[in-house]
Image (spheres, rainbow, N blue to C red):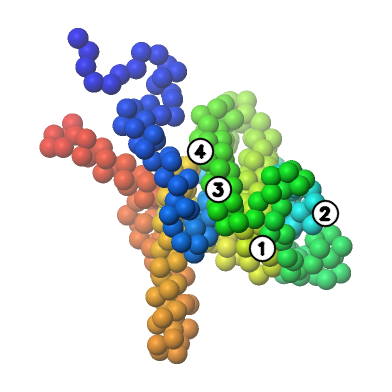
Amino acid sequence: MPCGEYFTDYESRMGLVRWRTQKIALAVGLPIPFIAPFLLGGGTTTLLTQAYIFAIAVLGLNVILGYAGEIVLAQGAFMAIGAYSTSRLLAVGAGLFPALAVGGLIAALVAVGFGLPSFRVKGFYIAISTLALQFIAEEWFFVNSQLAFIHGGTTQSVPSNVGLVGSVGTLGTTVDKYLLALVLLLVFAMLSLNLSRTGVGKTFRAIHENDLSASVLGVNVFKNKLLAFAIGGFMIGVAGGLFGFQIGFINAEYFTIGLTLEHYVMLLFGGLGRVWGALLGVGVVTLVQDYLNDGLNFLADLTGTNATALLPVFFGAIIIVVLAVEPKGVLAGLGKIKEYLRTWPFAY
């Protein structure tokens, strides 16, 4: 007589939640983030909201870099496009969901435009193409007052109380923004998980591993690269719009190359190409960064030096250690520990 857990059909075997322990953990753990804002302070709730928003942006980066293998150095620019577009639409009373959708679509179109060189080049050269977008957005476009008729001004105030669609379903409190960011994160996380299991996701993986082999097998490499840029750009643009709505104002200084590198740290730390790795990386890096900021601010006040400049050094050292010990990220390392404990004390 069979014992333990086993599968009797292919659909069960390929399910997102397959094991009994996973189902129990989901049932117990899923309500916790929805209850958390009513138990935590306002500062912690705001920090978690920002973590959820950054997680959406990192998931978008994961689609482009982790799935399709295209290096993108314009994360900050894509978020800025989404933020400024959303702000402009909110100012005319369009509602939050239409504003976020349009901001995401504009970011996706720009991402596709700067992904066009992938027809002829790849790797480092695509990175330079997207880095050009970052410099254009950061150093010229969004700080140029003569172009204010397009972006609305370098510094803008975002309405704090807006409806989901028009004036219907007004949001504005800290808890409202928290729950909105959480729900959208869950939606995009589910989309990312399922994308990796579809034919499109497998095509992205094939292009990532060897685009020449994928082309020989009949894959339209250029088309699918642009599709990855569009999907990832849309998610990053939505995250930018949410970020502007959460903090209540936007400025070009928030969307610099430093933000791009920060998201790279989050993705590489958790695990490239893994949805749970991206979420883990964002959570750990955000919480550690907040803790270190408090400590470094205290040290700066005590010594009179700019101790906060040590923060990038700390994260740089962490990334070097992680890539040296486990190049696939912390999540892959935890998976190895899990497999070891599953077979211990036997070697098979």
Which is nearer the N-term, disc 4 or disc 2? 2
76 or 272, which lies in front?
76
Query: Residue 61: image x %, image y %?
Result: 57, 49
Residue 209 is tagged as 4
Disc 2 to disc 1, C-alpha distance = 16 Å
Residue 94 screen position, x and y as percent: 79, 48
Q: Give the image location of residue 106, x and y in percent.
A: 75, 48
Residue 179: which disc?
3
Q: Residue at x 40, y 82 (%)?
A: 299
Chain-order first, disc 3 or disc 2: 2
Badge 2 or badge 1: first in the primary sequence: 2
Q: Is residue 285 visible?
A: no
The quarter of the displayed image where residue 10 is located? top left
Looking at the image, which residue is at 48% across and 42% down?
A: 275
Disc 1: which residue: 248
Q: Is residue 348 left or right of residue 176?
A: left
Q: Are marks 3 and 1 in contact (CB under 8 Å)?
A: no
Instruction: Name the element at disc 3.
Output: helix
Give neighbour class at mark 3: few <14, some 14-19, many 20+ (Cα, 10 Å): some
Image: 290 above or below 225: below
Q: Is residue 187 left or right of residue 298?
A: right
Mark 4 packing: few (<14 Cα in 10 Å), some, or many (20+)? some
